[in-house]
Amino acid sequence: MSTPLRLKELSKKADLLTGGHRLCAGCGAPIAIRQVLLAAEVPLVASNATGCLEVSTTIYPYTAWKIPWIHTAFENAAATISGVEAMYKALKKKGRVDRKIKFIAFGGDGGTYDIGFQSLSGAMERRHDIVYICYDNGAYMNTGIQRSSATPLGANTTTCPAGSVIHGKQQPRKNLTKIMAAHNIPYAAQASPAHWRDLMTKVRKALDVDGPAFINILAPCNRGWRTPTHNAVELCRIAADTCFWPLYEYENGRLTINYKPKEKKPVTEFLKTQGRFKHLFSPDSQDLLKQAQENVDREWENLLREEACWREEAETKGEG
Amino acid sequence: MGKKLAITGNQAVAEAMKQINPDVCAAYPITPSTEIMQRFASFVSDGVVDTELVTVESEHSAMSACIGASAAGGRVMTATSSQGLALMWEMLHIAAGMRLPIAMALVNRALSAPINIHGDHSDGMGSRDCSWIQIYSENAQEAYDNIFQAVRIAEHEEIRLPAMVCMDGFIISHSIESMEFLPDEVVRDFIGEFKPTNPLLDVDKPVTYGPLVLPDYYIEFKKAQHEAIKRAKKVTLDVAKEFEKVSGRSYGLFESYRLDDAEIAIVVLNSAAGTAKDVVDAFRDKGIKVGLLKPRLFRPFPYEEVADALGSARVIGVFDRADSFGGFGPMYMEIASAMIASGSSPVMINRIYGLGGRDFMPEDAEAVIKELVEIADTGKATTLKEYIGVRE
């Protein structure tokens, strides 16, 4: 019987990422990761890509991890966990391991969308029984806020600075969650720590499937987003309410949108909370601001249309 | 006694891997090593081995998966060549730094550019500093025998470092020669059970692999690694002794060929040594005191023993099938280090040969030995480093 997803019961579970790690005050990543770990009801082994989460939780001779954990390099969290999972299968077959264990990989957006993209795609295609968790803060924050392919349109980073001629990042984000879903894996989802029960339900679904699963989690970074240290979760809520970060899941290819804001707020409500978008509110950046809203609208409408198609199909089948 | 068969180098290595039956193999195709994993894949498909084969999307992922699998707590093997090893380079250091006893067959091939698929030692020499134990093999028999010994050395509890067994691409990997196999049960007993240390799969004892180590501890890790690989010299000899008992074939840190009283010595690695030994015989027949040293254990390099074996030589010619552009060839640098550290000062020349699979002919060895004879007479070398067999 799994622990009910209620705060009272969950608060009694052991924390598998302990306090004392050295992630920044107000960082979104450990909130997301602790929710992931708290959702799991089976023993986990994790691999971690190089990045903030890795360097800040394992400064030798200390470790914040109470689960077996391995970090090898930046671009290969998925390949590394593939190997661990393959050994599990081998030893289980030979009777040298008898426990049920699940395998999880953590990577930031740089280690997932960019340098780790090939290794992630390969692991998904090979159908390893693994869950890949991307904590997406929208830039290479560990090295000092450089643009990644997850950086939103218009954002100011140290490698796409808001200058007098070029006003921040000129390209929209890569839609990685959709790309992962296009691998026809049993489970792919997008989540955020503000909707913690939704996030934890998704983690349980991901761990339950036999085969690869991917969850993309929004993780605010106050250093890179230029925000205060107290409102990471609130920022995640605004991201969902503006549909900048829609919450949805693909279960065996079928899309469900898990959160539909009663009133979809303009994306400026999200952008204005963060210093990285400050320059977009000057008169000469209006075009980028307009594009940003169009991009959000297009993605949201596409999601609604796709979900409606699935609903129609189910209804037709139901009638038949 | 095992059966005797005519077989290619790649087949011999695939056969060795079949007999080892590792828990996990992760590999990616690359010429000329492809055939090893291809043959192994059919052993998997036919249920001859019960290995989990992970057919990754790159060599970088191959080594990453090998590392994950090895840390999980089982026996892991792979094979590659050239660009594949180059792509693994980052992960080679990590496998060694984590002290994981992965065994790999490296079928030596030239590095791009220009692209070339044939045999030279640029790949192996390029990974010299990765803290892998490196064992070189003259022929298919040696490659086959070395694979078993590499597994034992790598997994030895005082070492726990990865090991690669090298053989020449095409010249050995694709040529058929007669060699002797060991019976399966002999291999099984010789290899023994894998003994995991701090496996990730022991979920009751969680361990952290690959933490961030800052200046307060990093150098201690590296010193420990240095001490561990140094111990591999003695373990290589111990394992060779044990191997001789079961196979009747004897191995050392290197092979000395007619070196005892040699005034002139040549140093030749891998397949070219076979060719050169015939030429040494021809000179010996003429009364010229020439001998050959064929290195086997390249990392750790047995400096004292090599210097001792070359002790009587006044002139040494070192052949390199790889170059350190702008420097001497990698083998020359080792031999020079060995001789200088021993206090002797022979005249030493370096000849770069056979890059990109250019044939090494008896005439090539003959020309260099003639040059060495001349140097021995005059005491002077005109060109220390030179390419041979180059079209002008």
Image (tube, coloured by chain):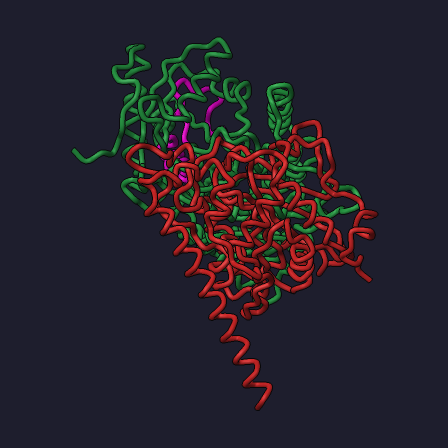
Q: Is residue B337 left or right of residue A45?
A: left
For the colour red, the matching chain is: A
Residue B2 vs residue B117, the one in the foreground: B117
Q: Is residue B164 left or right of residue B185?
A: left
For the colour green, the matching chain is: B
Q: Residue at x 54, y 55 (%)?
A: A123
Taking the image as drawn, is residue B86 in sight?
no
Q: Which residues are magenta?
A: B254-281
Task: Work out whether A32 lies above or below A226.
Answer: below
Residue B85 vs residue B94, the one in the foreground: B94
Q: Is residue A265 left or right of residue A55?
A: left
Q: Find out whether residue B313 is within the magenta segment.
A: no
Taking the image as drawn, is residue A304 in sight?
yes
Question: Percent position (x, y) of residue B268?
Answer: 41, 31
Q: Find out whether residue B265 is within the magenta segment.
A: yes
Q: Quadrant of residue B316?
A: top left
Question: Percent position (x, y) of residue A275?
Answer: 47, 35
The C terminus of chain B: image quadrant: top left
Outermost residue to the bottom: A320
